[in-house]
Amino acid sequence: MKSLCVIAGDGIGPEVVPVAVDALERLLPGLRTCEADAGWGCFERMGTSVPQATLDLMKDCGAGIFGAVSSPSHAVAGYRSAILTLRQALALNCNLRPVRSWPVISPQPNIDMLILRENSEGLYVGRERMDGEGRALAERQITRRASEQLAQRTAEVAALRNARRITLVHKANVLPLTCGLFRDSARQVLAQAGWDARVDERLVDVAALQLVASPEQFDLIATTNLFGDILSDLACHWSGGLGTAPSLNWGDGIALAEPVHGSAPDIAGTGRANPLAALLSAALLLRYHWQLPSLADQLEVAVSDFLKDAGTVDFADRTTRVIADGVLARLG
Ligand code: NAI
Ligand code: MG
């Protein structure tokens, strides 16, 4: 029997996550779910943004769905971002971020790309310091091991979707040691897996331009943590914006589905939160972690059919409910 750890978090997290859980329960009768705490509200109550009990539950379940958490944009003693802690503590080393055209809400058809973002290191290792002379410094860590792991995942996903192209995105002209190690390690693994002829490279600035100017040229993109974070938010414009952008934090035998958006404090409590990103994140859990592609297809087709029939996603203060009801009804 499959188990799911449900971490709703802050803001709109508790509004969109139950919709995704409902969809999974319909597709997987008998799914066992348990709730766990994390985020800013949790930090205020318990003095930690991710209690040990949450990590233990995630390990027990092997799969989870995470809503969003709020983070202050200034340093707070003892506080560390919950999602960064979860990714590192559970070795969720790869972040899958698909971007595809949907009926009605996408500005352009025929876009279908998947960004694989390294999820454990880069500039997000959290080693920032002041040197006492008016200088703030941040360390960027790139390891051969993490780069190879990401490339291994990229090869697996490439095989699943018979990829026409794998684009490695980096900035090795300016950062030859860190980006060079990423690029060379990834190239080696992809060559060993037989993808040599379909691998190409882009510098991150050119990749950003091309993601705007000709997004349909991309298939798989593999890149480092910060670049992947920024490029995937940029690219999700093509799927219909942040409210529709799903992701999967993916480790060995463990995965955490996560809508790309944050806690959206500006709309929390108004009923306007779009649950599509959470629903489509659940589909990623089905497709890649549980390896149930036909159930993932069923969920994505339900989303697509709903959008075609509805003609919009703006239902004012009933957005969450209207979309949830519309998609769930199509799951039978
Ligand atoms: P955000 O993603 O929360 O919101 C950006 C804009 O998109 C807002 O106008 C919001 O209303 C809209 N939006 C986001 N999700 C939506 C949805 N499902 N439906 C409709 N509209 C949606 O990013 P922002 O405002 O930069 O950050 C707010 C808080 O969230 C901060 O505390 C930040 O640290 C946190 N955050 C957390 C993330 C996570 O949990 N992984 C990721 C990004 C931000
Ligand atoms: Mg982001």
Image: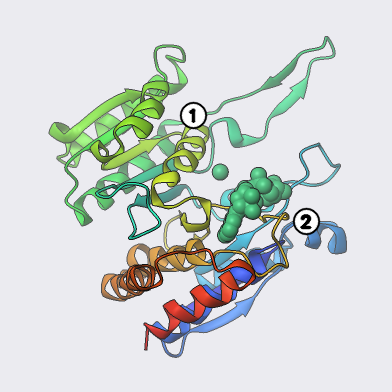
Residue 206 percent across, percent down from the top left: 37, 22
Quote the CA–CA distance across marks 2 and 1.
Answer: 29 Å
Q: In front here: 66 or 94?
A: 66
The verdict on label 2 being within 8 Å of ligand 1 is: yes
Residue at image position (44%, 16%) is: 177
| Residue that carries the numbered disc 1 in the rendered image | 142
The verdict on label 1 being within 8 Å of ligand 2 is: no
In-image side of 200 versus 202 (left or right): left
- The quadrant of the picture showing ligand 2 is top right
| Residue that carries the numbered disc 2 in the rendered image | 40
Q: Mark 2–mark 1 contact, CB under 8 Å?
A: no
Q: Residues within 10 Å of mark 1 (few under 14, many from 20)?
A: many
Residue at image position (49%, 68%) is: 63
Residue 188 is marked as none
In-image side of 130 versus 36 (left or right): right
Residue 249 percent across, percent down from the top left: 48, 54
Query: Residue 212 falls in which quadrant of the image?
Result: top left
